[in-house]
Amino acid sequence: MSVSGLPFDDFRTLLRDLPGPDPRALVAARERDAQLTKPPGSLGRLEEIAFWLAAWTGRTPAVNRPLVAIFAGNHGVVKQGITPFPPTVTQQMVENFAAGGAAINQICVAYDLGLKVFDLALDYPTGDITEEPALSERDCAATMAFGMEAIAGGTDLLCIGEMGIGNTTIAASINYALYGGNARDWVGPGTGSEGDMFERKVAAVEKAVALHSDHLDDPLEIMRRLGGREIAAMAGAILAARVERIPVLIDGYVATAAAAILQAANPSALDHCLIGHVSGEPGHLKAIEMLGKTPLLALGMRLGEGTGAALAAGIVKAAAACHSGMATFAQAGVTNQHEH
């Protein structure tokens, strides 16, 4: 990706000129749905998912090359004592993904999903957001561009996930900066912050947002100052998918915060996205509501690493199979009540 002027300029242009859905594919899907051997609307959200797939891929609903992309980053704010795990756990979990030993590996096997893991300079945590910006504009833009490469091998359904010790503090800061309220509205336990540690987490979010308060009217500045490398990379991946008209499933609280940056920059930026699940992290449902979305699943999960999005991919695959594989009334020789 060429960086023409200031590093963020190309992203501002991309965000302004987003492609829309394919109306002809949507009409064709609705027409076929009306002929399938079921009462109209009886598959509920599965029908809406099939229409969404058609509209964004421009073809009959199908999921042939699903991909889970996990982005891993480390955060300087961890030194504020906000999480019980050290940053070294991020690298250890990346190695666990590579070895096939994590929850996401099992879900990918169960649903036949591809998996790619992107390790984002884990030895170099971002700046501590309570003291300085997380990233320079150049680094943030470069990381977004790197995230855009996630779809380079080709996919027709992208599931976005993350790994990063400290990143629920980052997500809470982004939501607090975007939507206001109180820091406590957005801070949850994450990987197990409670008691004094939880209070330090709330204080870190308050301090960070106050420090950067003069720059919070620009979503890309919020991402650069309060985000992290995995936030920037996930935003880049979601944006690249939109440019290529690839449907996206967003995972939990942290992935949703990355998506929220894009929607704050362009209200239609997430039209090609569904939220895979509502996590057990307290701020997530409120964050999803701010995006105007309805999650597909509510299983009380709060693991991250793309697990909720990957489970939702199983539902999306089933929705596509029902739409494309079911017989029509004419094919099945079943009487269609609407024609009598």
Image (cartoon, helix red, strand yellow):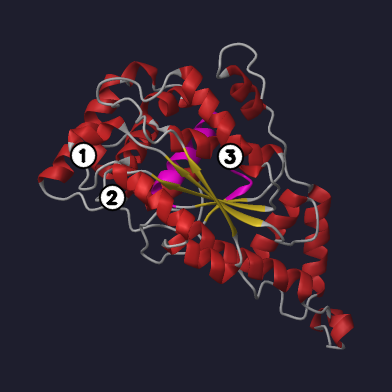
- The residue depicted at 14 percent of the width and 41 percent of the height is 199
273 above or below 75?
below
Q: Earlier in the sequence, mark 2 or mark 1?
A: 2
**Callout 3 touching callout 2 (CB < 8 Å):** no
- The residue depicted at 19 percent of the width and 33 percent of the height is 80
Task: Say if residue 168 shows up in the picture.
Answer: yes
Q: Residues within 10 Å of mark 3 (few under 14, many from 20)?
A: many
Which disc is residue 201 wearing? Answer: 1
- Give yes or no for residue 264 being in the magenta stretch: yes
103 above or below 191?
below
Which disc is residue 183 wearing? Answer: none
Q: CA distance from mark 1 to mark 3?
A: 28 Å
Residue 242: where, in percent of width, then height? 66, 40
Residue 38: where, in percent of width, then height? 73, 80
Q: Earlier in the sequence, mark 1 or mark 3?
A: 1
Q: CA distance from mark 2 to mark 1?
A: 10 Å
Residue 133: where, in percent of width, then height? 35, 21
Which disc is residue 237 wearing? Answer: 3
Q: Residues within 10 Å of mark 2 (few under 14, many from 20)?
A: many
From the image, state whether disc 1 or disc 3 is nearer to you.
3
Residue 49 vs residue 89, the one in the foreground: 89
Residue highlighted by disc 2: 190
**Dot 1: element:** helix
Name which residue type carries label 1: Lys
Name which residue type carries label 2: Gly
**Dot 2: element:** loop
**Callout 2 touching callout 1 (CB < 8 Å):** yes
Name which residue type carries label 3: Ala
- The residue depicted at 45 percent of the width and 38 percent of the height is 230
Q: Which residues are magenta?
A: 252-273
The answer to which image quadrant residue 317 occupies is: bottom right
- Give yes or no for residue 192 being in the magenta stretch: no
